[in-house]
Amino acid sequence: MTQKRYDQLINSKRGFIGATIRDVLLPAILGKETDGILYWIGKDLAREYPVQSIDDLVLLTKQLGFGKLELIKNSPLQHTFKLSGPVVEERLAIDKEHTSFTLEAGFIAQELEFQLGTVTEAEIDGIKHKEVRIFAQNDPQKNVNQQETEIVEFIKLHRDADSKPDSQAKPATN
């Protein structure tokens, strides 16, 4: 680890240990399989915290420290999100070329699958200097089979006065 990287991580908004685990240890352990495994870890994480609406997904994403999630485009089959904020900017500034956001993509895919009742996949659609675009596609022809469906009980999120859902503040465009 270089001095520059240490300095960035020790001053991380995520905390030194959180930043080190996510951006140093996991890639070291997972190697070339980092993106694929993180995607499935994201889906597993969503199973721990299933939420029933996009507004709740936006809030939970913030509470988990992933950044500010915003639905910027949606249709019955597709959703495009923007993930931004200080945490995203910080992670991209440390190592834009090797920073993975597939955990977040898997998390979003599974949450949408619970909400829509159809098979949903998500992928990173683009990474810019200060934001990440995540594209999710659902397939209504492939409804989650009743026998294969996990029984989920949606959680109720704790909201403070500052956690008004962003999606209510600005309508998504089709």
Image: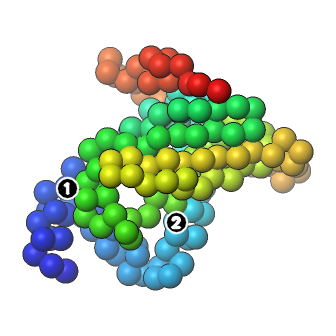
Q: Residue type at mark 1: give it.
A: Ser
- In the rendered structure, the answer to whether residue 106 lies left or right of residue 34 reads right
The residue to which callout 2 is attached is 38
Q: Is residue 88 visible?
A: no
- In the rendered structure, the answer to whether residue 80 lies left or right of residue 121 reads left
Within 10 angstroms of label 1, few (less than 14), some, or many (20 or more) residues?
some
Q: Quadrant of residue 53?
A: top right
> Could you tell me which quadrant the N terminus lies in?
bottom left
> Could you tell me which quadrant the C terminus lies in?
top right
Q: Position of residue 72 (x, y in %)?
A: 53, 32
| Secondary structure category for the residue under label 1 | loop
Q: Residue type at mark 2: give it.
A: Leu
- In the rendered structure, the answer to whether residue 126 lies left or right of residue 64 reads right
Q: How far apart are the two marked residues, 1 and 2, measured between alpha carbons?
A: 21 Å
The residue to which callout 1 is attached is 12
User: Which of the pair 80/23 is nearer the observer?
Assistant: 80
Measuring 34% from the left and 64% from the top, which residue is drawn there? 96
Query: In the displayed structure, would residue 106 be above or below residue 78?
Result: below
Measuring 19% from the left and 63% from the top, which residue is drawn there? 9
User: Which of the pair 16/102 is nearer the observer?
Assistant: 102
Query: In the displayed structure, would residue 34 be above or below residue 154?
Result: below
| Secondary structure category for the residue under label 2 | helix
